[in-house]
Every structure is written in C-alpha cells, then in structure tokens.
Amino acid sequence: MEQALYIYNTLTRKKEVFHPLHAPHVGMYVCGPTVYGDAHLGHARPAITFDIVFRFLQHIGYKVRYVRNITDVGHLEHDADEGEDKIAKKARLEQLEPMEVAQNYINRFHEAMDALGCLPPSIEPHASGHIIEQQLLVKEIMDNGFAYESNGSIYFDVEKYNQKYHYGILSGRNLENVKDASRELAGVGEKRNQADFALWKAAQPEHIMRWPSPWSDGFPGWHCECTAMGRKYLGNHFDIHGGGMDLVFPHHECEIAQSVASQGDQMVAYWMHNNMITIDGQKMGKSLGNFITLPQFFAGNHPKLERAYSPMTIRFFILQAHYRSTVDFSNEALQAAEKGLERLLDAWKALSSIQPSKEGSVGMDKVEALRQSCYDAMYDDFNTPIVISHLFDAAKTINGIADKKDTITAEVLEALKDTFHTFAFDLMGLKAGVHAAAGDGSSAREEAFGKVVDMLLEQRSKAKANKDWATSDMIRDNLAALGFEVKDTKDGFSWKLNK
Ligand SMILES: [Zn+2]
C-alpha cells in the first residue's frame, strides 16, 4: 500500500486516490445477476472486472469484504415499476416454483463464474432472504417523508427529495431531463409523478412471490435490496459500489436517493462502473438475435459463433480492454485473444524449463522494471491491458532465453518467474491449462495426469473386452464425476476434462 491507488469514481467523474474508511478493511458491494436465465457475456464483464479489483486490493494488503447479491425477486420486466417479475414469469412459463428457477440459474451462474476464474465473493446475499431489512428501509424513508402509499404500494417521492437533495447526482441528470425522458412512457398510474419509483409493490392476486407487510401483501422494489443488503453487511458507509454502466441510471441513482432519504447521507465513497460489451458493434439483446450465453460460448453452439471459446479466452479477451472502455465481440477478436493467451502460457511453460547460467545477459534491473511497470498499471485504475502488454514483453524476453539468444542467472530467473506468476495468474486470474488447477502450467505434471487417465481407460477397454461391464461402467462413471468426458472411438477412446 506504499503506492497510491487511483480509482475512477463515477460520482465525481475523476480518478481519485483510494482512501478506505477503515483501513486495512475494505467493503465492496457489486450488483449481481437477476437469476432467470443463463449468464451472458454482459455478466462476465462486471464479474471479471470486480474479481480483478478484489484480487488486487487483497494483494496489496487490504482485507476485503466483497458482497455480491443475487436478485431473486422484485426485478420487473424492462426494469420498470409495472409488469411481471422476471423470475415469476419464467416460473409460470416452465411450471416451476420460482425458487426452483432461481436456484437452477444460481447454480449455473456459479459454474460459469468458476470456469471464468472469478473468485467467489465473501457474502452472496439473496434479495428474497432480506425482505425484513428492505421493509425497514422503506419505513425509514416513509418516516422521513420521502415516500407515499398508493393502493398498498409505496413509491419514492422523487420530486420532494429533489427539493432538498439532487436526484441525478450520479448520472449527471437533473429531474427535468428525467421527466422529459419518461414523458413518452405510459401514464403515471398509481404514482404522483412518472419519475417516482416503487419501494414496495402490492401483489396482484395471481402473483406468487409475496410477503406480508404493514402496507399490503407484496414484494420489494428492485432498488431496495442493494441499499438494504449493502448496509446490513458493510455498514452505513462503505468504500466501493460497483456494477455495469447500464446500472448507473436508474438503479444506482435510486440507491443513492434511498440511502440519503433514509439515513441522511450517502453510503458509498467510490462508485465504479464497467463499460458494456457490444456484439459486432451492436448492443446485445434478445430481439437482435445476438444474445449469446456463457455456456453457448464455452460449447460453441450459437449461430454467431464460428466455434467454441474456452472460459480463459473470454477472460483474457475482456482483460485486454480497460474496464471503462467498450469491448466489441467478434469471432476474429476472440481468436486473436486466444492466440495471445497461448503466447503467454507458452512463455510460462518455457520459463519452467529454462536452465540458469552463471552469468546472465538479462539483468535483475530488467525484471524489476517489468514488475514496477505492471504495478504502476494496476495502481492506475486497474489498467489490465497495460499489464498484459508488459507480460507480452516479458514473453519475448523469456523466448529469447529459451532460444539461447540470452542467458539468465538462477536468482534473476526466480524473480522473473515470481513476477510473471504474480501478474498473469494471481492478479489477472488466468489459469495455465485445464489440468493445472494451481495455475502452475507445468507440462510434466500435465503429462503425468494425462497418462494416469489413459491408464485407467486402458483398464476399462480390457474390462469391456472381457464383458466385465460393471468395471467398465464404474471407471467411466467415476471419471465423469470428476469432470472427464470419455468417448469411445474406432481405435479405442478419447477423453477431455471439462473444467
Ligand atoms: Zn444493485
């Protein structure tokens, strides 16, 4: 922590030196998924962005509590105050209990995040498990006079709030812009003004997800959960709140209004937002036919995909752009990322087989400069593309030594390994290969693992030849449980590890 960490704060629109409220502790809240469908590329970006923040803050000595919520209730279609709950709708269409829908997509989300190398957050609270906290928040806002009841629903009174505070402080809007933007929309319905937003919604008779409250049987408005759960787990004031840029308005703007209206001031010191991913220059959308889920990327089964892309390729592709820049997906871009990633991983492999010499043409100063440049990039608002460009330079140096054009002493070699490992694996979170869970990429280890699997499968072939089906099935099933996919081929078998 001897170097100043700069973070771009959406609230002040500038890079600021990061001063945590209670160092060495840091509280970070990131908006998580609404679990009614598979995660897509748009979910991968915030997950990876804040995984980098989480890793780096810990690396430089902070104790980070990273909270990422699961929205399993209250997120209505089109992010509006009317319409059906996204999860309840899916449940109705598939004749499932809403929590079955949520759990299924939570499990699949976790699998995808794990594949992408994202560390699990410290706490992952569910909106449906914090109804009481959300009701208390609504009550506080009502008691302070910034909310009103209408037909059993409670709305935030934006007009009244804006007389005292500034509604639009985060997104740079003012109430007049907001009103102009929402004028074309349908009438105000139960609300006094179109800009007002729901804190509590009375449930229609057919609505299945509902809880009792002093106002009606209903469910909380979408914006409440993050304010209520952020406060519960990180306190009235905490350091970082993150999410995608598409959440700045209305979601995060409403969160600020809720915290100010309830406790009199803002909760969050640094607002961080990652930019969006476009596909062939277009916004991703279900209606545009360019909506590709992460499992589809991993399997290559979408018409837009020329083939499958590994989770690490996707991670690397995302990290090759700064989190505040836009990223445009195309097959060419992903294939280029894949080649780049291979180049780095090959350099790492080469590094492990380099023999040191007594005298070295690559000096310690070169490795120290590499290390410092990588740190400088990370301390400058988590500039991952710059770190990666330095790692490519390091790869050139490594290849030069491997090709015997240069030499390196044992001490400098150790420092180079350590620097490469720190930035490529510990901080960028890349994994060296499916067999190398620890990210050490040792080819000798991979080979040994592979031979063990081959050996087992040869036993299985023998068992099959002897019509010993029990043994043959047991070997296949046990391997499958470990994530190995075994295929019988003309000349025997083939296998791969789906991890
Ligand atoms: Zn949120």
Image: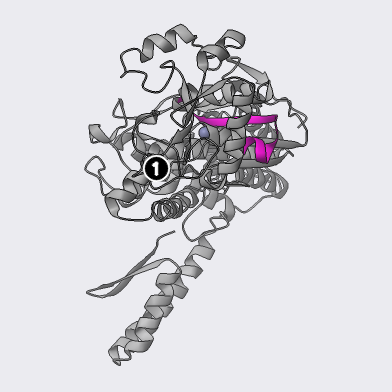
Drawn side of residue 140 relative to residue 219, left or right: right
In the image, residue 68 sits, relative to residue 4, either above or below, namely below
Q: Quadrant of the C terminus?
A: bottom left
- Residue at left 55%, top 37%? 214
Residue 27 pos. (x, y %): 68, 36
- Residue at left 42%, top 44%? 313
Q: Is residue 238 magenta?
A: yes
Please name whichever residue, 357 or 77, is drawn nearer the observer in this view of the structure.
77
In the image, residue 193 sits, relative to residue 252, either above or below, namely above
- Say which quarter of the image contains residue 238: top right
Work out whether residue 376 can be spotted. yes
What range of the chain is rendered magenta? 229-245
Residue 139 pos. (x, y %): 60, 31
Residue 480 pos. (x, y %): 40, 71
Q: Which residue is mark 1?
A: 338
Q: Amino acid at mark 1?
A: Glu
Please name whichever residue, 499 or 270, is drawn nearer the observer in this view of the structure.
270
Drawn side of residue 37 relative to residue 422, left or right: left
- Residue at left 56%, top 31%? 242
Give the class, few, some or many, for how many residues have Cα within 10 Å of label 1's Cα (few <14, many ≥20).
Answer: some
Q: Is residue 30 magenta?
A: no
